[in-house]
Image (cartoon, rainbow, N blue to C red):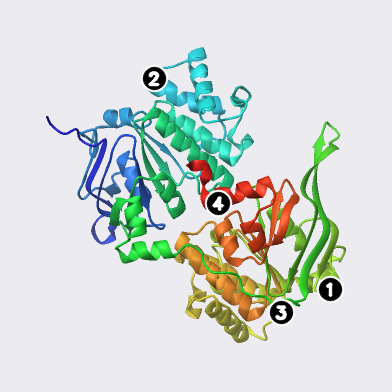
Amino acid sequence: MKDTPPLLEVANLAVSFGRGEGEVRAVRGVSFTLERGRTLALVGESGSGKSVTALSVLQLLPYPRAWHPSGSIRLAGQELVGAPEPTLRGVRGNRIAMVFQEPMTSLNPLHSIEKQVGEVLEIHKGLKGPERRARVLELLHLVGIPEAEKRLGALPHELSGGQRQRVMIAMALANEPDILIADEPTTALDVTIQAQILKLLKELQGRLGMALLFITHDLGIVRKMADTVCVMNQGEVVEAGPVAEVFDAPRHPYTLRLLAAEPKGKPNAPADAAPVVMAADQLKVWFPIKAGILRRTVGHIKAVDGISVAVREGHTVGVVGESGSGKTTLGLALLRLIGSEGAIIFQGEAIDGMPPARLRPRRRQMQMVFQDPYGSLSPRLSVGQIVGEGLEVHRLAADSADRRRLISEALVEVGLDPDTQDRYPHEFSGGQRQRIAIARALVLKPKFIVLDEPTSALDVSVQAQIVDLLRELQARHRIAYLFISHDLRVVRALADDLVVMKDGRVVESGPAAQVFDAPATPYTKALMAAAFDLEAVE
């Protein structure tokens, strides 16, 4: 009896963009197989070729600019490379479906949830009217959308990030595909929502018997979700095999480096008698809800509701919680970048009621590093102009030569070549751009820095580098950090004290080691389980 072919067989796949001297070889000789009901993970850093490989399976690359110098992709023995468009239309969304990384950009902002999920059913199954609506409701219930009947007319912006991702999964599962490709489906989500989505995918896979091709750079997810793994680097599979075998006994240097790159280490041991740099007492930020023709205030969104916090010299206070818990609002309020009520004390001086003119000279000592370095750096300014802008505003350089010297010193401190100050942000990697953002804050010699999710947009190896850099800079300059994040692994490597926020309030706080090792509230326990154990997935 002849052996049954694998459900998906990729052999010697190569992908290039452009031709001749401008050719970029994005994928080189990738081979793997995927059996029904099994999960294969493609893991590697940004630019390793993971997503290009996945898009090749569905033949969704921008052909003819993208082309295959070699390779074969077979679905149950049927060749997809070079297949006619009608054949591919029958495969896409029907036999192979895909869930993308960012649901807000993948869903049409102008169409209701019912229309977007129903469109898949209408195209592939010909369902219309009540029959289509009934199937849409069935799918929304299947993926755990609460009060699905009331959500049919909702637009994407009216749903939370986790709910939007569930809608994307419902669309992908509409035709009960043989293979589901999940391209970083949890990267943009909080840890608790991430655990829920991973658990949902596991349950749906078991119920529907589909194969799962999972693309991620999160090694913790690979350990829990996948049966086999392909480690990719610079377009090649450098190591492949069962997950336990590859992770427990890695052979390739890149795999070893990737496994060692998860943020490690402990925060600096700060002085017990270190003075308080920034403190707040019963801080409140309430946003009014207005309604009616006269726009009367009918209620408030309590983004920060009576929070007290103190950050000492050389210390790091970690602020964690899900999206919408008020973490970033707290940081902005401490820096007086949004209005608030309650006492704010910076270096022993009350600044909550201080006029802008008096506050301006003190701003050089209070800085912020944002989540997305590409979004926070002007593409029209050179690195030198970006880093040196604060020096000009606060008149801290004697002349242009002195300013260039100070910029060079700041770039060297964050591990960049001082000659790069004449280049522009688009010429740097994500990790390098974040170093530039840190240099921009550091050049002013601040006493207090708010770090708002500074590593969440970065690969795991780059995350570890930025964590080490922040730790070194703090030890050298005794800077006080307020570190905002939903990545508890990174927070544990940096924070001395921890504040856990939910709905604008503090649900738990104390020494970081104590909160991590013995969380006292159910909410904190759920955060810890989702971040470190992923128990909900098992």
Circle 2 is placed at which residue position? 125
Tag 2: residue type? Lys
Estimate the spatial distance between the alpha carbons at disc 2 and disc 4, rounded to whole Å: 40 Å
Residue 324 in sight from this viewpoint: no
**Which structural element holds mark 1?**
loop
Estimate the spatial distance between the alpha carbons at disc 1 and disc 4, rounded to whole Å: 37 Å
Other-residue count near label 3 (Cα within 10 Å), few / some / many at <14 / 14–19 / ≥20: few
Above or below, 377 against 291 in this view is below
Judge left or right: residue 334 versus residue 152: right
Other-residue count near label 1 (Cα within 10 Å), few / some / many at <14 / 14–19 / ≥20: few
Above or below, 181 against 273 in this view is above
**Which structural element holds mark 4?**
helix
> Is residue 460 or residue 407 the one in the foreground?
460
- Labelled pair 1, 4 in contact (Cβ < 8 Å): no
Q: Nearer the viewer, mark 1 or mark 4?
A: 4
Circle 4 is placed at which residue position? 531
Circle 1 is placed at which residue position? 348
Q: Which of marks 3 and 2 is in front?
A: 2
Tag 3: residue type? Arg
Which x, y percent locates residue 382?
54, 70
- Labelled pair 4, 3 in contact (Cβ < 8 Å): no
Circle 3 is placed at which residue position? 395
Above or below, 73 against 232 in this view is above
Which x, y percent locates residue 437?
58, 67
- Labelled pair 3, 2 in contact (Cβ < 8 Å): no
**Which structural element holds mark 2?**
helix
